[in-house]
Amino acid sequence: MNRYTIANIPGDGTGREVLPAGVQVLSAVAQRCGFALEFRDFDWSCETYLATGKMMPDDGLTRLADHDAIFLDAVGYPGVPDHVSLWGLLLPIRREFDQYVNLRPVRLLPGIRSPLREKSTGDIDFWVVRENSEGEYSQIGGRTGTGEDEIVIQQAVFTRRGTDRILRYAFDFARKLGRPHVTSATKSNGLYHSMPFWDERFAAIGAEYPGIATDQYHIDILAARFVMSPERFDVVVGSNLFGDILSDLGPGVTGTIAVAPSANLNPSRRYPSMFEPVHGSAPDIAGQGIANPIGQIWSGAMMLDHLGEAEAAAMVLAAIEAVLRDPQAVLTPDLGGNGSTAVLTRQILEKLQGR
Amino acid sequence: MNRYTIANIPGDGTGREVLPAGVQVLSAVAQRCGFALEFRDFDWSCETYLATGKMMPDDGLTRLADHDAIFLDAVGYPGVPDHVSLWGLLLPIRREFDQYVNLRPVRLLPGIRSPLREKSTGDIDFWVVRENSEGEYSQIGGRTGTGEDEIVIQQAVFTRRGTDRILRYAFDFARKLGRPHVTSATKSNGLYHSMPFWDERFAAIGAEYPGIATDQYHIDILAARFVMSPERFDVVVGSNLFGDILSDLGPGVTGTIAVAPSANLNPSRRYPSMFEPVHGSAPDIAGQGIANPIGQIWSGAMMLDHLGEAEAAAMVLAAIEAVLRDPQAVLTPDLGGNGSTAVLTRQILEKLQGR
Ligand SMILES: CC(C)[C@H](C(=O)O)[C@@H](O)C(=O)O
Ligand SMILES: CC(C)[C@H](C(=O)O)[C@@H](O)C(=O)O
């Protein structure tokens, strides 16, 4: 029997409510499909920071390293500056474990209303492949000068290795999906050094995949096209920042911010990959038991897929879709219902059991 | 009689078709309102570049300097890399003339269908105030290493002076509009140096305007909110890159990319300001006489407003809206009609004359 150890990091806010829902659903599907999941809890969060001055212990990364995957909810809490909490936990995990791919589906699900006119289930269905380890997200830079004369430098670093591997991932992924079309997000008209380089590498790597069509748009007009013609995309690849923007905008366009999942992948499998919903820690509704667990559960499905349990992954996604398609379903308030996290989770478990 | 000299730069592609339409309408309104506009043409473009290796002559900026305003269409043509054409003309003009504000309305116009459900004229109506002179758009950086080991550095520079003045502009503008609410675009959770600084200055300048409400969102979720709840915004202020993205996304959400205007302002009036449509040079439809002139004409209205001819500016905008509201109007193909640039311009002229 295959056995996987998973490091759970519920993080802050609603994370403590939806992560257990994910664990419940994954455990159920593991039992049905005949593999074992062993979850270990890591209570690292902004609370940890307020108590200890650190988001995680000094040997935190080492302690995570011998897991097969990391299952995270969200980090962030009022009172702890975001750049402290993120650069103290999420971003070091992405970097240390070389999770250089951030993969997010943009999919209009059954039962969910897109804010766009005349779009229905199936009309919008593509993937954003985001560079997740370098680029604009950087701690290089700083401040100089004082008062009125202060200036701040923020440096982005693009390596050829880092750029090529994310572009190759996007092309390979498009091929695997059977949707041979990759769109690149650029801004080579404004960002003088980084983006012309990105375009050059996109052209070079694209040439290695003659069967795959390519196009590219500047990020400003690309964002507009996500709204005007989202049905045109198959796989969209972008830098760390552009991918970040597009992979929130996409779920915005499909009405699914609260349910969208994401995978931070180390495709070599040398280090654990990490799975987390797109939404944040939602401090405004924390503690009420009404947070939508679907983003967490769907992220769990992506985790199973990555671990090689594709069938189980598909079953979880099918169960989510079956609930959303069911007119009798009791959904959470963000989807217009009056159900709790527990009630929505129970319905997903029931669909999983074929009830 | 007030007299203004305007430097026309039609640029590339459809620019040569829509800029004259703008001149026609502005001349007509000037005559009606009793002021004079003297237009001088500067034929600087990618063609210039291909012939001379320069987008404009060495004394180009000096030649523009003694005009009251610059009326530009769009620069960019296949065969000339974007970063060459833009850094050879548009961006130096913005910087030399210290046009540190890029101002763009996001407005759902009559007769134009938003891609969003259930939104109609008036529901979406806000402004994006973009920093236009520094930040992420920078030529500082470069490449080092060769082959597989190449790395590329792209540096963003935020000055306190530059940041404070754009934030103050946004607050003053919100006050002038009578809509006391400013939203800041940030990404202080990922961009370690620049955006925490931006947030700090936003808080500091905001404190100078106690009557104005503030909020801030990370750019990823803010982009999603442009789609999910665009009616919530009044004035949105962002850095050069974030403002760029938001001010294309906004017109995307209101279905008006082809008609949206923009102003590059030097509020001190020490140097000429520049007015240009949001859309590009549209090489795919150039030469057919079917480009939509509204973005250019509306940009002209913003120019008149800046020159102090507020009444004339309002008349031009009213004429545009009257045509769009008229069910008999013959529009250009981008708006679903079969009219030409000339035909649409003529109708605007007629509305201006009260016919
Ligand atoms: C053409 C390009 C450099 C420019 C910009 O990004 O500033 C354009 O997109 C704009 O918004 O005016
Ligand atoms: C929290 C933040 C640093 C993070 C990011 O920008 O990467 C988040 O927005 C995401 O997309 O996972």
Image (spheres, coloured by chain):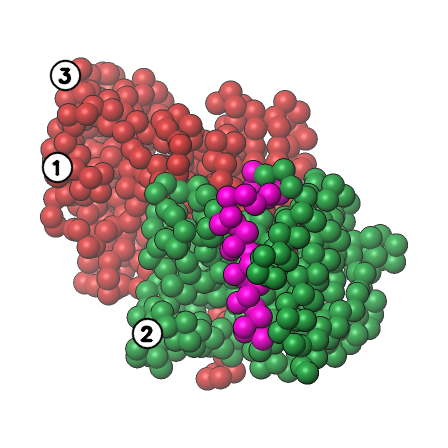
Chain colours: A red, B green
In the rendered image, residue A184, in percent from the top left (x then y), is placed at 57, 40
The mark closer to the camera, 1 or 2, is 2
Viewer-nearest residue: B352 or B314 = B352
Amino acid carrying label 2: it is Ile
Determine whether B1 is above or below B155 in the image.
Answer: below
Q: Is residue A114 left or right of residue A212?
A: left
> Which span is picked out in magenta?
B309-336
CA neighbours of label 2 inside 10 A, class few (<14), some (14 to 19), many (20+): some
Determine whether B206 is above or below A194 in the image.
Answer: below
Separation of disc 1 and disc 3 at Cα? 19 Å
Q: Which residue is mark 3?
A: A355
Viewer-nearest residue: B318 or B62 = B318
Residue at (32% x, 29% y) in the render: A109
Q: Which residue is mark 1?
A: A339
Q: Are marks 1 and 3 in contact (CB under 8 Å)?
A: no
Mark 2 C-beta closer than 8 Å to ligand 1: no
Quarter of the N terminus of chain A within the rendering:
top left
